[in-house]
Amino acid sequence: MIQLILQQGVSKELVNFPHILEFAYRKNSTIQLNSFSTTVTGCICLYYILDGKFNWMIDSQSYTLFPGDCTIVLPGQSIGGESNVLNIGTLYWIKIAVDEGGKLLMGKWSGLNKNEKLSVNQILIVNKGQLVLKLKEAHILMQNLQAELRNEEVGFFTRVNQLLDELFILISRQLIRQHNSRRDFPQAFLKLEQTLRKDLEHQWTVEEMAALTGMGTTAFTEKVKNYSGFSPLNYLINIRITEALKLLKRGEVNVTDIALNTGFYSSQHFATTFKRFTGYTPSEFRKNNRSKS
């Protein structure tokens, strides 16, 4: 797991930016259990997905985020991982304090004029139900923010705040364009996942999954990789592990039954795969979950 987490009051990189409460880059190679509990924010939280697939609860709604997705959570809204889990993948996030006066979300740090601040403020508040945006352009802005904060080259103070302004402008423009919260994700793939979840016991092949979307295997593999960051088979395994996590929390269900019901060949195959994805054996996860309940 590779990560960079800068925190206000702890990291020297943020001394000049009291409005930036936290900036992070995190790469998970395994599922992180009990590491992303749902909390109500008191600031603006922006998350950007670089790769992977993340199942989150945002303001009491269930969302699945893929590469290129950005979510903005305003003060008073909540965010956390389903079952408190942070999935495999890479993401950026930044937490920004709101204006002390409470009237505007963007404080004195912003270089936007008063009318522009009011416009952005109004757009964010009116569209606060649009929690997930397809915003691939945010990648370079997050990347540049990371470089400016770490390198502290000439003009970095001005440049960091300019990048934040650019990020808010980008989000505001996208919110205007996106009139509803429907994901920019092909309906065929949404139907595919629903079909897979209904019959996880079946030993799905890439050819069968591709056929369900009406595509050839090569095009299908490229599309799945582009949208989820996984190969088709790892995408399927991730679905199986997600379902297994839910079943393991129900203590009355036998581990062997869970393995077979979610499509694993045997309890040993299940245990090996589960540990590779989460760092725990199924029994260890169940025991750990009981001790926290």
Image (cartoon, rainbow, N blue to C red):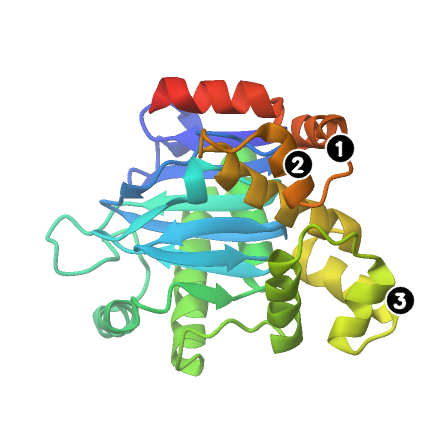
Residue 3 at x, y percent in the picture: 57, 30
Q: Is residue 64 visible?
A: yes
Judged from the image, the secondary structure of the residue bearing numbered disc 3 is: helix
Q: Earlier in the sequence, mark 2 or mark 3?
A: 3
CB atoms of marks 2 and 1 within 8 Å: yes
Q: Which mark is residue 259?
A: 2
Query: Residue 238, relative to residue 197: is it above or below?
Result: above
Q: Quadrant of the N terminus?
A: top right
Q: CA distance from mark 3 to mark 1?
A: 30 Å
Q: Is residue 152 visible?
A: no
Q: Earlier in the sequence, mark 2 or mark 1?
A: 2
- Disc 3 versus disc 1: nearer the observer: 1
Crowd tier of the residue under label 1, counting other residues whose Cα lies within 10 Å: few below 14, some 14–19, many 20 or above = some
Residue visible at 45% across and 33% down in the picture:
249
Residue denoted by label 3: 218
Judged from the image, the secondary structure of the residue bearing numbered disc 2 is: helix
Amino acid bearing label 2? Ala
Residue 124 at x, y percent in the picture: 29, 68
Residue 269 at x, y percent in the picture: 76, 31
- Disc 2 versus disc 3: nearer the observer: 2
Residue 171 or residue 60, whichever sits in front: 60
Judged from the image, the secondary structure of the residue bearing numbered disc 1 is: loop
Residue denoted by label 1: 266
Residue visible at 53% across and 56% down in the picture:
65
